[in-house]
Structures are given as structure tokens and as C-alpha cells.
């Protein structure tokens, strides 16, 4: 895309909203926030909206669907942490406190859209429809990523920081070349924005006007490194301007705001308006993983401050006040969440039946000669041991 064509595209998009190209690309002056921490709806003039930034409230049915996924996500986080302590799982990066971000990222996608998650996005992968045991298989080191990415349009949960953003951009580029109606959500954390792959992914996506939403869950820490030691930018959303795309900030513990802003972002990307960067301000309530001691780098008072902003209690308070949570609805949501937890308990309490021969499957679509040779050597060794 030429420089003039790129400028024309930004100009056309900004005209849709009746604002200047500069105002379109810059984040709204105030973070998008629809619900107060106590679950009350904020007045319209305090929601962080400005001309051209309009976020209609999701329907009650959508909110109930999202809340159900939110409750399940919290139950899964707690269950998996218990399974780690019981020795049934090697490691687990809990997203306790970040579940609203992950629910919104998945539920706002269409059937043919793709999700590219990180290692902490278990709840997003569950919300995408992947079976619970398939999601958790890799965390006990059993079998590849645990599920078929093509079956769910959900890439493997990426442990290396930011590599999945490049893959996400590649899928979006391929879809555009094929004329497919596909939107891609590429998830990452604040620490990932310091990686070179982040720059390459955003730059390529903007230059080729690709339908990618870069969704940054800013939980304030890259393991033990605070955001202040990673970036001097006014916000991570402001980084978008340098690549020629729009950026936005949203309260990552406000499920309603997240659903609204992600729905709008998916629609804009699908309409050919190019990539967007969304920074969700949230917090990792628990340690980085079970191997981390978060008390060494943050104060308990900080954690307590964020507990008061919990996305689950906030959304429940709103739905209660709106009369949308009957006793029957609460009972069903709770039972559904507990059923998922039971599935994980039952599955993880069974010994894994692994076959080393499968190590060489699904590495490449067509095995290389070297890989086939290594597989043959292992099979021969195993056969001799079993003889």
C-alpha cells in the first residue's frame, strides 16, 4: 500500500465517525469504562467516550452469556491452581482477575474468525469452545498443544513471548489474499510489547491493512518487571499511532465495556478498516505461575486494591441490580462452572497414557527427511526395549 493510499484509508475511516484522522488514531482521552467497581452504570459523560467513539451497551442475553463464561473461567482458574498443588499439573499460569478480558476476546469473534492466545489465556480458549481437558493437556506435559487448532480456529497457547502475533498476522494476510471474511484477535501481555516481534507484527499488519485486533492485557507486570520499567509511553495504546493504526484503552475488569469495545473492533476490522490495538487495564491477582513468589516484587496493599475491582463481583452486582439474575439462572451458571471443574478433576486424576512415538506427529504438515530419520531411530530403540 502506498503512503497516499494508506493516508486515504485513515481519512476515509475517520470521516465515518466525523472526526479528524489524528483523533481517530489517538486513544480517547479517558479510558473506556461503562461500569463502576460496585457494578453501577457510569453516566454517559463519564464513560470515556468522545465523538466518533461510541460503544452501545451489549444486550442482556449477551451479558448473561459472557457472565456465565466469566464464572466458569474463575472456577477453572481456582480448580487448576488446586490441581497444581496436588501434583496433577506441572505448572499453571493463573489468569485470576483477568477473566473478563479473555471472555470478551473470544465471545466477540465470529464462527470463522481466529484467536491467537498466550499461555495465560486458558479462559479465552475455553470460551472459544475447546474442551476443558484438551485445553489443559499441555500444562501437564502430555501431548502437543492438546487440541486441533483448525477444528476451533484457535492457535496453540504460546509460551514464547509475542511469537504468536506474527502467526496471527500471517493468518490474516492469507485470509485477505483468499478473499475470506476473517478477523483475527492476537492476544499478548504488557511485557510482550517490549519484544521485537511486537513491532514487526504491528508494522506488517498496518502496512498491508490486515483485519487483526492486537489485544494487550496490561496486568502491570512482566513476571516481576513493572510496566514503568518497560515503557515510557503515555499508554501502550498510544504505540498504535506510530504504526498507522488506531489505539484504544479500556477497563479490563469491566466486562460490559470489553464486550462493547471488542464488538466494535471486530466489526471495524471486518469492514476493511485495518488493524487496531486495544489495551485492557487489568491485574494478575495471583503469582505469575506456581513457581513465582509475587511478594518479592509487589505489596499486598496493591493486590487488595485490585480485589475491590474484581470483574466477577462487578458484573454480578450489575446483573443483580438489573434484575437479570434469577435464582434459577444463578444455579445453572454455578452448576455449569462446577461441571467443567469436575471434568478437569476427573481427567487430571487419571494417569496419562503417553506414547513417545507421537512426538514426531504434527510438527510439520509434511515430515522432513531428518524428522523421519529421528522417528525411525526412536521407534527402533523402543521396539528393542519391548522385545
Image (tube, rainbow, N blue to C red):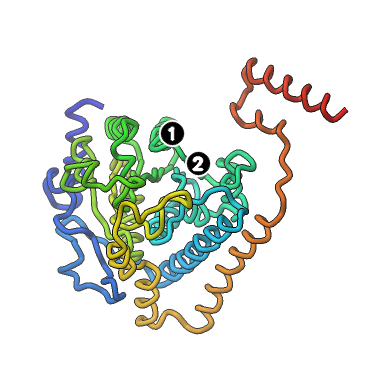
Q: Position of residue 228 (x, y in %)?
A: 21, 46
Q: Nearer the viewer, residue 109 or 379?
A: 379
Residue positioned 61% across, 67% down in the render: 339
Q: Position of residue 256 (x, y in %)?
A: 34, 66
Viewed as shown, does residue 320 lie left or right of 257? right
Q: Quadrant of the N terminus?
A: top left
Q: Position of residue 74 (x, y in %)?
A: 47, 64
Residue positioned 64% across, 43% down in the render: 142
Residue 320 image-quadrant placement: bottom left
Q: Residue placed farthest to the right in the image?
A: 387
The residue identified by callout 1 is 167
Viewed as shown, does residue 319 lie left or right of 355? left
> CA separation, marks 2 and 1?
9 Å
| Badge 1 element | helix
Q: Nearer the viewer, residue 263 or 370?
A: 370
| Category of crowding for the residue at label 2, using alpha-carbon neighbours closer than 10 angstroms: few (below 14), some (14–19), many (at least 20) | many
Where is 222 relative to 67, above or below? above
The answer, for residue 147, to whether it is visible in the render is: no
Q: Position of residue 330 (x, y in %)?
A: 50, 78
Disc 2 and disc 1 in contact, CB within 8 angstroms: yes
Which circle marks residue 17 in the picture?
A: none
Residue positioned 43% across, 42% down in the render: 181
Specify which label sits upstream in the sequence, 2 or 1: 2
Which circle marks residue 155 in the picture?
A: 2
Residue positioned 47% across, 83% down in the render: 326
The answer, for residue 318, to whether it is visible in the render is: yes
Q: Quadrant of the C terminus?
A: top right
Q: Residue placed farthest to the front in the image?
A: 296
Amino acid at each position: 500500500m502506498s503512503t497516499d493510499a494508506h493516508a486515504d484509508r485513515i481519512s476515509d475511516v475517520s470521516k465515518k465517525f466525523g472526526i479528524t484522522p489524528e483523533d481517530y488514531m489517538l486513544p480517547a482521552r479517558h479510558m473506556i469504562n461503562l461500569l463502576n467497581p460496585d457494578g453501577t452504570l457510569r453516566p454517559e459523560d463519564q464513560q470515556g467516550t468522545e465523538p466518533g467513539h461510541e460503544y452501545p451497551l451489549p444486550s442482556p442475553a449477551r451479558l448473561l452469556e459472557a457472565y456465565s463464561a466469566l464464572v466458569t473461567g474463575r472456577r477453572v482458574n481456582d480448580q487448576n491452581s488446586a490441581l497444581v498443588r496436588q501434583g496433577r499439573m506441572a505448572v499453571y499460569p493463573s489468569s485470576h482477575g483477568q477473566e473478563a478480558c479473555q471472555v470478551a476476546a473470544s465471545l466477540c469473534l465470529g464462527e470463522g474468525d481466529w484467536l491467537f492466545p498466550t499461555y495465560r489465556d486458558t479462559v479465552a480458549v475455553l470460551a472459544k469452545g475447546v474442551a476443558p481437558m484438551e485445553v489443559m493437556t499441555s500444562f501437564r506435559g502430555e501431548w502437543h498443544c492438546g487440541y486441533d487448532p483448525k477444528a476451533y480456529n484457535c492457535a496453540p497457547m504460546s509460551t514464547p513471548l509475542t511469537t504468536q502475533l506474527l502467526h496471527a498476522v500471517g493468518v490474516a494476510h492469507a485470509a485477505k489474499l483468499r478473499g475470506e471474511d476473517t478477523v483475527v484477535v492476537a492476544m499478548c501481555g504488557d511485557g510482550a510489547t517490549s519484544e521485537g516481534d511486537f513491532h514487526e507484527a504491528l508494522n506488517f499488519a498496518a502496512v498491508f491493512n490486515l483485519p487483526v485486533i492486537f489485544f494487550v492485557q496490561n496486568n502491570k507486570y512482566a513476571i516481576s518487571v513493572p510496566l514503568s520499567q518497560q515503557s515510557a509511553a503515555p499508554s501502550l495504546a498510544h504505540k498504535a499511532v506510530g504504526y498507522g493504526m488506531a489505539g484504544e484503552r479500556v477497563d479490563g475488569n469491566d466486562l460490559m465495556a470489553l464486550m462493547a469495545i471488542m464488538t466494535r473492533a471486530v466489526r471495524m476490522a471486518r469492514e476493511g478498516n485495518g488493524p487496531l490495538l486495544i489495551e485492557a487495564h487489568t491485574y494478575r491477582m495471583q503469582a505469575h505461575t506456581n513457581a513465582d513468589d509475587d511478594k518479592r516484587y509487589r505489596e499486598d496493599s496493591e493486590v487488595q486494591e485490585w480485589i475491590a475491582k474484581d470483574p466477577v463481583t462487578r458484573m454480578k452486582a450489575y446483573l443483580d441490580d438489573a434484575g437479570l439474575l434469577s435464582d434459577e439462572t444463578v444455579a445453572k451458571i454455578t452448576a455449569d462452572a462446577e461441571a467443567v471443574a469436575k471434568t478437569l478433576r476427573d481427567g487430571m486424576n487419571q494417569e496419562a497414557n503417553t506414547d513417545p512415538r507421537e512426538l514426531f506427529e504434527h510438527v510439520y504438515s509434511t515430515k522432513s527427511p531428518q524428522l523421519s530419520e529421528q522417528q525411525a531411530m526412536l521407534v527402533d530403540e523402543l521396539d528393542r526395549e519391548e522385545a
